[in-house]
Amino acid sequence: MTRLAASLITSAVVLTLAACADSPTETTALVSLQPMFSVDGNNAHIHVMPTKSMAQEALAQVQMNASKRGGSTGIFYHGGPILYTTNVAAIYWASAPIYAGGPAAGSNNSSGNAGDNSLVGTFLRTLGGSQYFNINTTYYDGSNVHIQNVVNYTQYWANNTSVPGAGATVTDAQMLSMLQAGFTSGKLTYDRNTLYNIFTAGNVNLGGGFGTQYCAYHGHGTITLNGASVTVLYSAMPYDYAYPSACTSGLKNPNADAGADYEVNTLGHEIEETTTDQLGNAWYDRRGYENADKCAWTWGTTYTTANGGVANMNIAGVDYLVQRNWVNSGSGGCALHL
């Protein structure tokens, strides 16, 4: 068993026990829970999106305790930083384009997104300003400054060097080392408010528990720039279609690229959570669930698309099936738009 796997299992037990003790008033013991799991390598910390089966129990606990919230929204601020506007970058770590229309292997754009015509790239370009991402504006800092409905797709790197082989396990230390190389070479531009999304192909096992314990995760780690240690935000975005029963909706995809169609669901999840809880010490509930965790793998109202697929939202003329997100207002709840 890897250290990551052991940490995930131990933390899952702690969080489940905490869920059973949920009450309208937060207690000191529950406040101490942190919604992240430490892993070895470059001071990395991560928070996972569970597989469908692992999420079922968590969602049942959220619903069971809904009547106990009293006047709260069911999620709490713990004092940490949030992203007021969200910048996103895409790192396609593969020897060929992972998604149809993606940038050519070896290419990069460190100051924009022109050249990424994949469905994933389209989603990143248009997510900001949507009614869906507007849900995140219900979150704020200790001075009541709210998150803005802004997502900027600022750069990409189709990294075809030292590509992990099929089935290979890639540690967080290796992911951070790869990002370090991108910043050092100029393929990527560093920004402390950017989420660097790392995509891989096939069954490459980012983190060591892909498809069995989680489908994606976000985290932060330490790299060195100009002799100084800095924090970098990143997400592990393995190819969800490699594990369709664990990491896809199981419903017919609404667009031509099934892999990208299923990936935008987990991608939206990680962007939302990084925006509201970038370092794992801002917004989460008594169980340690972040906003997107509370609605994971739930779709709300769906409709049939022109190709016979299933979608629940249309952003800039494109249909998607993306999980709901937690609204932090009123008595709280999962929604598709605000």
Image: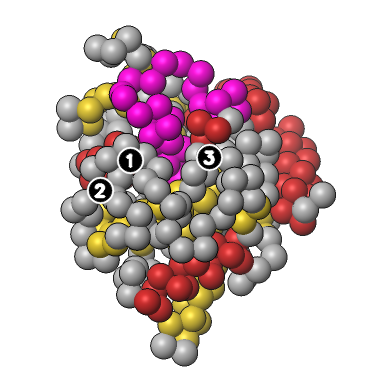
Residue at horizontal 73%, vertical 42%? 12
- The spot of residue 140 in percent (x, y) is 37, 52
Q: Earlier in the sequence, mark 3 or mark 1?
A: 1
- The spot of residue 315 in percent (x, y) is 23, 31
Q: Is residue 185 left or right of residue 270?
A: left
Which residue position holds label 3?
Answer: 202
Is residue 5 inside the magenta stretch?
Answer: no
Which residue position holds label 1?
Answer: 120
Badge 2 density bin: few <14, some 14–19, many ≥20, Cα 10 Å: many
Tag 2 near tag 3, CB within 8 Å: no
Which residue position holds label 2?
Answer: 116
* Chosen colour scheme: secondary structure
State the residue in front, 274 or 182. Answer: 182
Which kind of residue does numbered mark 3 sit on?
Answer: Gly
User: For the residues marked 2 and 1, what is the alpha-carbon distance in whole angstroms?
Assistant: 8 Å
Which kind of residue does numbered mark 2 sit on?
Answer: Asp
User: For the residues marked 2 and 3, what is the alpha-carbon distance in whole angstroms?
Assistant: 20 Å
- The spot of residue 265 in percent (x, y) is 42, 33
- The spot of residue 321 in percent (x, y) is 37, 25
Residue 201 appears in view: yes
Instruction: State which quarter of the image contains the C terminus.
Output: top left
Which kind of residue does numbered mark 1 sit on?
Answer: Val
Tag 2 near tag 1, CB within 8 Å: yes
